[in-house]
Amino acid sequence: MKIAIIGPPQSGKSTLFNALSGQDVAVGDYSRSEHRAIIKVPDGRVEVLGEIEKSKKITHAEIEFFDTAGFSGKGKQASGEISSTHDLKQVDAFAIVVDCFSSDAKPEEDLRSIIDEMILADMMHIEDNIEKLDRKMQLTGKRDRARELEVLKLCRDALNDEKLIGEIGLSAEDEKTIRGYTFLSLKPQIVVFNISEEKIEQTESLRQKYAGYRMENIRDISIICGRLEMELAQLPGEEKTAFLKELGIEHPAVERFIQISYNLLGLISFLTAGPPESRAWTIRKGTNAVHAAGAIHTDIERGFIKAEVASYDDYIKHKSMAALKAAARLHLEGKDYIVQDGDVILFRFNV
Ligand SMILES: Nc1nc2c(ncn2[C@@H]2O[C@H](COP(=O)(O)OP(=O)(O)OP(=O)(O)O)[C@@H](O)[C@H]2O)c(=O)[nH]1
Ligand SMILES: [Mg+2]
C-alpha cells in the first residue's frame, strides 16, 4: 500500500513523515523536499506464529509513505497542474496534513484549499477525456463505452459542484470503468489535524469538533501532534513506552494511522506460517481465496487447488496444521471462500 502525505506548505508534512517512519528528515526549512519510507505494519500475530513454527524469517505487511510537496496550497487560484516528483496518481490514499498548531492556524480553510486544488486538477483532466471519448465514439459508431462516458459526466458534475468524485458513491462496477483515469479525488483520504503540544489533552474534543469532516468510504480524520509523535518515533524502545505513558497516549501515531488506513481502505491481513517464513499479507475485505493466493504469487493463483484454513486463535491453540486437522479445526476451502482477517492459510496448488 502506498500513501502520499500532502498538504499546504509548512503544515507539518515532513514532521508527520518522521513520526510515521522514525526517520529524521529536515523540518521547518521551507525546502518542500520529498522523501520516501517503507514501514512495517505492526501485527503481533506474525511474531507469535514465527515462534510456534521457529520460522527463520518473519515478514510483516508494509506501507510505503511519500512526503510530497505537489500541492501549492493556493486552492482555486492554483494552476491545476499539481507537480510532484513522485506520481501522486499511483498512490492508494492521501494523508492531508493541515496546520492546527500555529497561532493563526486555519485548518478548515487549508483543507478546503487542498480539496479545491485536487478538484481543479481532476477537472482539467476530465474535460479532455470526455471530449476524446465522445469523439472516438462518434467516429467509430461503437457504443461499448457509453457507460464509461456517462460515468465521466457524473464525475464532471460532482467536480463542478465542488465535490470529490469519491463522494458520488459510484458502484464498484462504475468505479472500475474509470479506474484507469486515476482521478485524485477518487482516492480515500485521511485528514490529519496537526495539533500543538498544548492541545494534546484536547485530542478527544477536537476529534468530535472535526467529526463532520468524515465521509463514508472516502475520508477519515486523525488528530495528531506531529512534533511530539516525531520525537516519540525517534526514541529507542523502552524510552518510547515511558514517554507514551507520560503523554497519556495509548498507541503511537503510526499505529493509530495504520488502523485508520486499514479501516478506510477496507484492508485485512491473512497469515502464512512455516519454518522458512511466517508472514502477514494485506488484501481487501471480501477477497476470495484464489485472489488472496495471487497476493503471494501469480503461480499459486493460477494453479490453485484448495486452501487449508484455520483461524489465528485456533492455530495458536493447536500449534500445527496436523493438530488442527486432528481436532477438526482445519477447514478445506475452495476458490470462492472469502478470506477473513487473521486466517492462517496453506495454499495447495499445482503449476
Ligand atoms: N508546535 C508544533 N509545531 C509543528 C508541529 N508540526 C510541525 N510543526 C512545525 O511546523 C514547521 C513546518 O514543519 P514541516 O514538517 O517542515 O512542514 P512541511 O509541511 O513539511 O513543510 P514544507 O515541506 O516546507 O512544505 C516546522 O517548524 C515544525 O517544527 C506540531 O505538531 N507542533
Ligand atoms: Mg517538508
Image: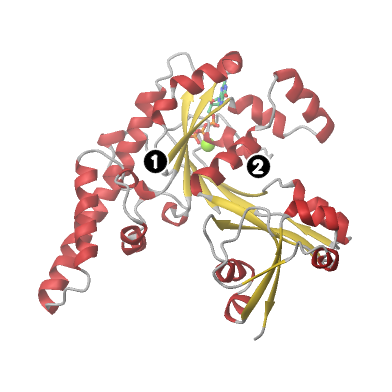
Residues under numbered marks 2 and 1 in contact, where contact means CB atoms less than 8 Å apart = no
What percent of the width, then of the height, locates residue 263?
Answer: 53, 43
Indicate the secondary structure of the residue bearing disc 1. loop
Q: What residue is pinned by disc 1?
A: 71
What residue lies at 86% left-to-right and 61% top-to-bottom?
Answer: 53
The numbered mark at residue 79 is none
Residue type highlighted by circle 2: Ser
Quadrant hosting residue 346? bottom right
- What quarter of the picture does the N terminus occupy? bottom right
Q: Is residue 183 left or right of residue 267?
A: left
Asked if residue 345 is positioned above or below residue 202 in the image, the reply reads below
Q: Is residue 25 visible?
A: no
Residue 116 pos. (x, y %): 30, 37
Counting residues from the start of the chain, the first of labels 2 and 1 encountered is 2
Task: Report how far apart the C-alphas of labels 2 and 1 lie in the structure.
Answer: 22 Å
Vertically, is 141 above or below 117?
A: below
Q: Who's the residue at 86% across and 63% down the image?
A: 56
Q: Which residue is mark 2?
A: 21
